[in-house]
Amino acid sequence: MSILLMYRVTVKNEPGVRRNVADTDSAVAARHVLLVNYFFPPMTGGGVPRPVKMAKYLRRLGWNVTVLTVGVKGPVDERLSVDDDVDVLRVRMWRLEWILWTADRVVRCMRGGVERLTARRSGRQTLLDHGFAYEEQEIASSKIGWVVPATRVALRLHRTSPIDVAVVSLPPPASGTVGWLLHRLRGVPYAVEYRDPWTVGAFWMADADGIPRTDMVTRWRFRLTRWLEAALLRDAAGSVIVNGEAHIGRLATTFASQTAGKPIAHVRNGVDLEDVRSLPREPASSAQLTLLHTGFFYHFYTPHHLIAALRFVQCQHPEALDGVKLEFMGGGFPRQLVRELERWGLGDVIQLTGAGSYSEALSAINRADGLIAVLPPLDSDRDRIPTKIYEYLSTNRPILAVAHPAGALAKLLDGVPAVVVADNGDQAAIADGFATFVGLARRQRAEGYPAESTRRGNPHHYGERAACMSAFLHQVLDSKRASRYGDASNPG
């Protein structure tokens, strides 16, 4: 049963002010939600802003919010600070990296042996062989060492301040296990939030080129992981899909018995318009046209197809490369691709910049002349929508999206002004799209940026996203109350 909840919740609180619920008329209605998010400031990355903004705006909607995360030291970006709004519990995890690394290495070696024998017979050179992609490390990144310490802290919190509902955000799977244990030990209902699909869209079931893996190691690993996901969904009170609305139907079909009768909501990532309103709206003065990509490249998430398309640009649209700088901000750019560019005489076109803070990334986005989003040409990424795209939409800059033309990202951008979508499976189409994008960026820089294009981000404000999440959580609580008493009424 899929329920897409989109109505607005009207309970409000003053921005930046922690409200004492006991002093309000709505004290009886106040609910305590626990957000279990491994990735949280001071960590950086695309998955970090979402829990921060959800906590911020759920608090304004009247929820008592506690965030359970891992203990990491470092400065917190001022735009990602929620200390005045919510409680943040930071838990030190057990050091099990060597065990997980060993397990990951064993699985990869066993699987890789089979793949190398197959590749040797076929003569096929993979993206991994070329150095254009990195081998996945899904086992090593499972964060199992966080489960027991985080569960202990959650149980202690529940004794002092009872939790009405928890939201466990995956990946990593450890977050889901914390919610499952909290439910098993204390009966706390939890909802699973899929920032990325798990076994329904397991990217490691294919290699970096999209060729299915059929070896016994991968098959048994998939069966075990699917069994774990089924157990997690069986006890869950509902699910939230973040990337790709199509995953709602896939999840409900694949896990029909585990999700039957439970709410499934589609609550995308977004942008906090309060963060971007104070930023300068005009690009930095430079003789070069700066085209920016933000975000880290990892595992099979690689820009090789965009870089390869620059050869087509060099031959068919050489004017599109004059005075242009492609900046990749965030790290992980494959060194082999840099060497390829240098071999083609295009080394000066690319600038690699390390990962910056959230505020630094937002500032860079608003200084650039054009913005680029790239998705790998893999089936597992067809329904992915990079978090950065919502931040891109909050600007009036042209956007180039290298993505599947029928995928979730293309559908999101359909009809949006100053956007070029290029088929990520067709290098000639990428080259043509790049040339069109450069022409658009040059024209808008010369003529001025239309003010109305900044409204592209308005529908994606995290205030709206939190209202959808609040509606979903109320639905979960109402469903649990109805199942307990036989209807939705309060027997008191």
Image (cartoon, rainbow, N blue to C red):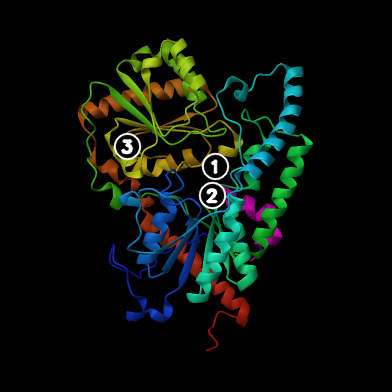
The residue positioned 28% from the left and 63% from the top of the image is 15
The disc, 3 or 1, on the residue closer to the chain's N-terminal end is 3
Front tag of 3 and 1: 3
Disc 2 from disc 1: Cα separation: 8 Å
Give the CA separation, mark 3 to mark 1: 24 Å
Is any part of residue 396 visible from this angle? Answer: no
Residue type, numbered disc 3: Ile
Looking at the image, tell me whether mark 3 or mark 2 is earlier in sequence order: 2
Measure the alpha-carbon separation of dots 3 and 2.
27 Å
Residue pointed to by mark 3: 365
Residue that mark 1 sits on: 383
Residue 312 against residue 137 in the figure, above or below: above
Residue type, label 2: Glu
125 up-or-down from 179: above or below: above
Residue 489, image quadrant: bottom right
Q: Report which quarter residue 431 is drawn in.
A: top left
**Residue highlighted by disc 2:** 245
Q: Tell me which segment is drawn in magenta.
A: 246-261
